């Protein structure tokens, strides 16, 4: 009898552990605006955004996690033969995001990325101020709950919307989002959406390496440096004209 109880306990523990270690592949999609652009310049920008997003559909968005850590990266696709180089370059810069590491115990997110010709480690807390709603839907076989948060750096009316499942009890998600009582299976921001397409559970917790190469900086500090660099570039262009 004791032997059977041990077998059952081992099976339950293994199943729970397996739900906390996995590799998730997300599918990228985007939504076109219903209203047509108001002028020629806006139409050109809109076409550029949509073409970049179309290239973004071919990239692979991958999250790997164990019970305490996760790491997220984007595997860029090969450019098609008829590629628009400017839009593809924008797509690469916008969607690649570098490497995003999350640590539950340390309550931190590290984004290793290149900008301004340097390597940075952008540090932020894991938890985001989410408002969990009562709305529910299924993504695959998982019952998910909707949560929203204000979009940092966006217009006032823009929010981030995610769907998370308590069936997979880890506080991680793609693109650096997390801090909810379950894995984020879908995240939407602006016109872009990432939705979990494939989940491969692992019997053994994968080893995840914390990024170490780069200068530590906050998102606000990096944003300030980028704006200063843009300002200098614009001044130099005006002087050369």
Image: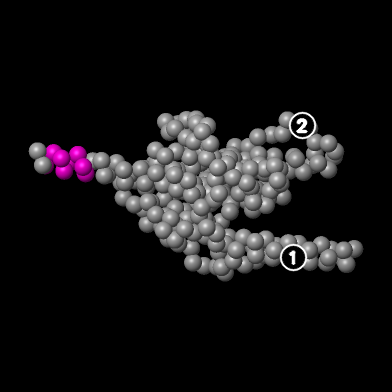
The residue that appears at 69% across and 34% down in the rendered structure is 32
Q: Which of 233 and 145 is in front in this view?
A: 145
The stretch of residues the image draws in magenta is: 3-10
**The N terminus, quarter of image:** top left
Left or right of 82 in this view: 70: left
Residue 95 horizontal/vertical position (percent): 61, 49
The residue that appears at 42% across and 39% down in the rendered structure is 166
The residue that appears at 35% across and 43% down in the rendered structure is 19
Among numbered discs 1 and 2, the one appearing first in the sequence: 2
Is residue 18 shown in magenta? no
Q: Neighbour class for label 1 at 10 Å: few (<14), some, many (≥20)?
A: few
For the stretch drawn in magenta, the main secondary structure is helix
Q: Name the residue under label 1.
A: 228
Dot 2 falls on a residue whose secondary structure is loop
Tell me if residue 119 can be seen.
no
Q: Is residue 236 above or below residue 193?
A: below
Left or right of 34 in this view: 147: left
Q: Mark 2 points at which residue?
A: 35
Residue 23 horizontal/vertical position (percent): 42, 46
Dot 1 falls on a residue whose secondary structure is helix
Q: In which quarter of the image is residue 219?
A: bottom right
């Amino acid at each position: 009898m004791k032997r059977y109880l041990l077998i059952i306990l081992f099976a339950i523990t293994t199943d729970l552990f397996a739900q906390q270690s996995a590799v998730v592949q997300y599918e990228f999609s985007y939504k076109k605006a219903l209203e047509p652009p108001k002028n020629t310049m806006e139409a050109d920008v809109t076409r550029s955004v949509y073409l970049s997003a179309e290239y973004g559909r071919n990239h692979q968005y991958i999250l790997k996690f164990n019970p305490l850590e996760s790491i997220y990266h984007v595997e860029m696709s090969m450019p098609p033969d008829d590629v628009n180089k400017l839009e593809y370059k924008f797509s690469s810069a916008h969607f690649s995001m570098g490497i995003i590491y999350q640590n539950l115990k340390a309550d931190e997110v590290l984004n290793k990325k290149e900008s301004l010709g340097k390597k940075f480690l952008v540090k932020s807390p894991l938890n985001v101020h989410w408002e969990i709603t009562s709305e529910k839907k299924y993504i695959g076989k998982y019952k998910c709950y909707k949560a929203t948060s204000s979009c940092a750096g966006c217009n006032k009316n823009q929010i981030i919307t995610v769907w998370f499942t308590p069936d997979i009890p880890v506080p991680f998600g793609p693109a650096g989002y997390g801090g909810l009582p379950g894995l984020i299976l879908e995240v939407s921001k602006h016109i872009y959406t990432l939705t979990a397409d494939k989940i491969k559970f692992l019997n053994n917790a994968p080893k995840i390496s914390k990024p170490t190469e780069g200068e530590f900086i906050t998102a606000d500090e990096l944003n300030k440096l980028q704006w200063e660099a843009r300002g200098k570039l614009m001044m130099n262009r005006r002087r050369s004209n």
